[in-house]
Image (spheres, grey):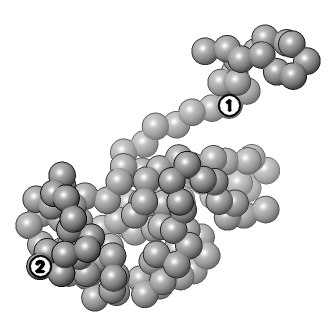
Amino acid sequence: NCDVNPFGVLYNPMSIATVIIDDRLIEMGFGEYEGIQGYTDDAGYNVNTLFHNPAGYIPDKGAESLDELFARTGEFLDTIIKPELAKGKDILIVGHGAMNSSIICQVRGKSYEHFWDEAIENCKLKCLIS
C-alpha cells in the first residue's frame, strides 16, 4: 500500500518501520467464554469478575489468568521492547483490550486492582513513555 503525503510524494510507510508479529501479543484467552455475548455485564458468568474486580478474578473453563497474561506480555516487553527503547527507538504496539491493559499496567507499575484504570478506547492511541 502506498499513500500520498501533503506534498504529493508517493511513499510506502512500511518502508520506514519494522513490523514484528508476536504471539505474546494476542488478546487474553477467555476459554469457553469466547464468543458469548454479555459476559462482561452478567454476574452469572465467572469471567465477569475480570471486568469488575480484576484482582479477584479466578479463571475457569479454559480462560487465561492475569498471571499468565502478564507473564507472556512481560516477556515481550523484556526481550523485545526494552532493548529497542535502549537504542532510542520509537515503538508502536497494536493490540486489543486486556492485552493492552496488561502492557500499560506493567509499564506504569500498576497492580491487578488497577487493571482497567487506563484502558484504551477503541481506535485510540496512548503514549506510555515519552
Q: Quadrant of the C terminus?
A: bottom right
Q: Is residue 30 visible?
A: yes
- Asked whether, in this view, residue 105 is left or right of residue 73, the answer is right
Number of the front mark, 1 or 2: 2
Residue 78 is left or right of residue 62, and the answer is right
Query: Which mark sits nearer the N-terminus, 1 or 2?
Result: 1
- In the image: residue 45, left or right of residue 124: left
Residue 127: x, y in percent? 69, 60
Residue in the picture at 16% in, 57% down: 36
* Mark 1 vs 2: CB contact within 8 A: no
The part of the image, by quadrant, that contains residue 70 is: bottom left
Which residue lies under the disc numbered 2?
44
| Residue closest to the far right | 7
The residue under label 1 is 17
Q: Position of residue 102 (x, y in %)?
A: 45, 68
Element under label 1? loop
Q: Position of residue 60 (x, y in %)?
A: 12, 72
Q: Residue at x 55, y 48 (%)?
A: 123
For the N terminus, the quadrant is top right
As drawn, 29 above or below 95: below
What residue is drawn where x is 51% and y is 53%? 122
Image height check: is 63 above or below 95? below
CA distance for labels 1 and 2: 45 Å
Q: Is residue 87 above or below residue 72?
A: above
Residue 37 image position (x, y, % from top left): 19, 58
